[in-house]
């Protein structure tokens, strides 16, 4: 029997986190392979979001989300400058419409400062008006380090860097079987069209990470890995409001999302969203029936936006570890030796702020892999 190809490290998934990991690991190790079921990189979660570089304001202190988001903010801007990737520090206004909202702003500021975010400022109604005349708000918390980025070009740069360091990236390669041989992982691609072995297997499968973990023999319910698909729809307006900052409503710390906020892209296009809708499986239609809800939410702080000006835009699906009514769930990054799968590293529930956190996640993975591959 012909001996299968063997790799040192295999990454499943060529989204933002998978490509960041590929670049980091190919720079340190040899025989790195990335397999991706789609025909190109970043075709799922990584291409269906608002492209926001977060500052790390909301997450519980000490969580991976808080730590990696805070670290990743500066690292991502540095990488964009070095590689000439389009980006802009637009700044973000978290607005209060009433006294209760102002209490939420104080709580957000306190949590952000606990996370090491020290550049926030509280703006009065007049100061908000000077920044955004179209905005109606009683006050706002201003985050100058929040911004936007061209995520596609960032991923492309990571792909090029990984390949330049020797990584192999194979598209149209769906993982359909994983077997631990006692020494390595035997991985089946496209129902047996190709098989190979790998010393380390890194699951960056995004929406399908729980399925991949189960293929490897992990009990995903016992481990808390079963994902809940949380769809987020966006609307846009024509004519669009004239804004230059990201605008977010004040929300309680345990909210599922960040409310119907106003985002910009690098071309100046304005979008509203996302909302939060748990669905049984990923699908991306945006229902016209949501127009009323979006209009009520958006017009509360942008009164010039009319219901008739809103129309469905895009949507994305977040792979959340928490289901409806559950409390906060952190990123899960776990080497599974204790579950009988040494050398398997599962990344489960990598949703927002995964874009901002991608470089610290990749460095964290490199540290884990360094303890396995000698």
Image (cartoon, rainbow, N blue to C red):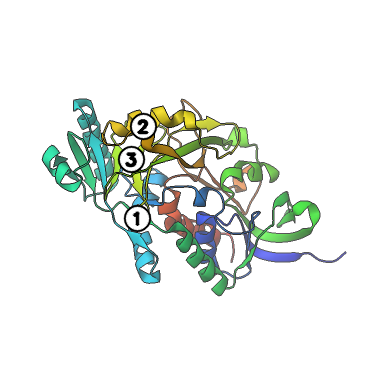
Please tell me which of labels 1 and 3 falls first in the chain. Answer: 3
Circle 1 sits in a helix, a strand or a loop, which is it? helix
Classify mark 3: residues with Cα within 10 Å, few (<14), some (14-19) or many (20+): many
- Vertically, is 170 above or below 121? below
Residue 86 badge: none
Classify mark 2: residues with Cα within 10 Å, few (<14), some (14-19) or many (20+): some
In space, the residues marked 2 and 3 are separated at their CA atoms by 30 Å
Q: Are marks 2 and 3 in contact (CB under 8 Å)?
A: no
Q: Which of labels 2 and 1 is toward the front?
A: 2
Q: x%, y% of residue 96? A: 22, 33
Please tell me which of labels 2 and 3 falls first in the chain. Answer: 3
Compare residues 137 and 42 and report the one nearer the observer. Answer: 137
Residue at 74%, 61% in the rendered image: 196
Please tell me which of labels 2 and 1 falls first in the chain. Answer: 1
Residue 307 badge: 2
Circle 2 sits in a helix, a strand or a loop, which is it? helix
Residue at 71%, 65% in the rendered image: 6
| Location of the C terminus (image quadrant) | bottom right
- Which quadrant of the structure image shows residue 295? top left
């Amino acid at each position: 029997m012909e001996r299968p190809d063997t790799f040192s490290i295999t990454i499943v998934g060529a989204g933002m986190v998978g490509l960041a990991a590929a670049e980091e690991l190919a720079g340190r190790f040899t025989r790195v392979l990335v397999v991706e079921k789609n025909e190109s990189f970043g075709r799922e979660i990584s291409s269906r979001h608002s492209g926001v570089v977060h500052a790390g304001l909301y997450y519980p202190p000490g969580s991976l989300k808080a730590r990696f988001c805070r670290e990743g903010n500066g690292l991502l801007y540095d990488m964009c400058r070095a590689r000439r990737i389009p980006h802009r520090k637009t700044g973000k206004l978290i607005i209060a419409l009433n006294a209760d909202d102002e209490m939420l702003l104080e709580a957000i500021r306190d949590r952000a400062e606990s996370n090491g975010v020290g550049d926030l400022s509280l703006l009065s109604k007049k100061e908000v008006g000077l920044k955004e005349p179209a905005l109606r708000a009683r006050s706002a918390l201003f985050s100058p380090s929040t911004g936007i980025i061209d995520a596609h070009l960032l991923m492309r740069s990571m792909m090029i860097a990984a390949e330049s360091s020797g990584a192999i990236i194979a598209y149209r390669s769906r993982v359909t079987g994983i077997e631990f041989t006692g020494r390595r992982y035997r991985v089946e691609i496209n129902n047996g069209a190709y098989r190979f072995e790998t010393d380390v297997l890194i699951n960056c499968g995004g929406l399908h990470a729980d399925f991949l973990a189960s293929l490897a023999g992990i009990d995903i319910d016992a481990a808390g890995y079963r994902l809940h698909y949380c769809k987020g729809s966006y609307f846009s307006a024509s004519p669009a409001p004239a804004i230059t900052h990201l605008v977010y409503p004040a929300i309680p710390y345990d909210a599922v999302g960040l409310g119907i906020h106003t985002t910009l892209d690098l071309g100046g296009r304005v979008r509203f969203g996302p909302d939060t809708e748990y669905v049984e499986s990923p699908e991306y239609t945006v229902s016209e029936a949501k127009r009323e809800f979006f209009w009520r939410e958006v017009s509360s702080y942008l009164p010039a936006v009319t219901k008739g000006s809103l129309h469905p835009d895009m949507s994305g699906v977040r792979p959340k570890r928490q289901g409806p009514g559950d409390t906060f769930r952190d990123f899960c990054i776990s080497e599974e030796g204790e579950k009988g799968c040494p050398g398997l590293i599962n990344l489960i529930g990598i949703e927002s702020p995964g874009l901002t956190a991608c470089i610290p996640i990749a460095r964290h993975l490199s540290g884990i892999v360094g303890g396995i591959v000698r």
